[in-house]
Amino acid sequence: MKKQLSELACRRRMLLREIETQRIEVAEISQLWKKPFALVDVGLKAVRFIRDRPALSSAAVAALMALGRKSIAGLFQSSYRTACYRKRESPKPHPTFNLIDGENNEKV
């Protein structure tokens, strides 16, 4: 009887270790899937928003059709140009003041 109980206790300890390793694996896998599921959740919320507000989606489609293809392309092109221009633009120091020396370099 003692032998059977010791075997059962040993088997129980082995199973508890196995359960702990499986629990850790499941936690790691769930961390990997957290971001993709968050993106799917956002997508589903957007679809529900559009489905629940048919007047808003109809108005958006009508507005896009009213603008026409050339207007939409022009809108995207101008916004793209603005974004590119802002990237190239960098703040430049004032040409008449030297920050290193602290002197005024104005030519009089």
Image: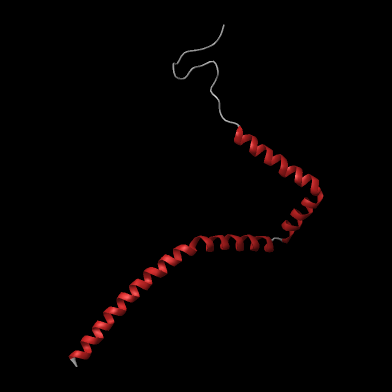
Q: Is residue 64 left or right of residue 38?
A: right
Q: Position of residue 96 (x, y in %)?
A: 54, 15
Q: Nearer the viewer, residue 45 or 107?
A: 107
Does residue 49 appear to the left or right of 67 in the view shown? left
Residue projecting furthest to the top? 108
From this viewpoint, which residue is outermost toward the left? 2
Provide residue 108's location: percent of width, then percent of height.
57, 6
Q: Position of residue 72 (x, y in %)?
A: 76, 47
Residue name at image x 65 percent, y 60 percent = 49
**Position of 47 relative to 4 (above/below):** above
- What residue lies at 74% left-to-right and 53% top-to-bottom? 60
Q: Is residue 36 above or below residue 71?
A: below
**Left or right for 72, reference 40:** right
Q: Position of residue 1 (x, y in %)?
A: 19, 93
Q: Which of 14 and 35 lies nearest the eye of the viewer?
A: 14
Is residue 38 placed above or below 17 in the rendered structure?
Answer: above
Residue plotted at (55% across, 25% down): 92
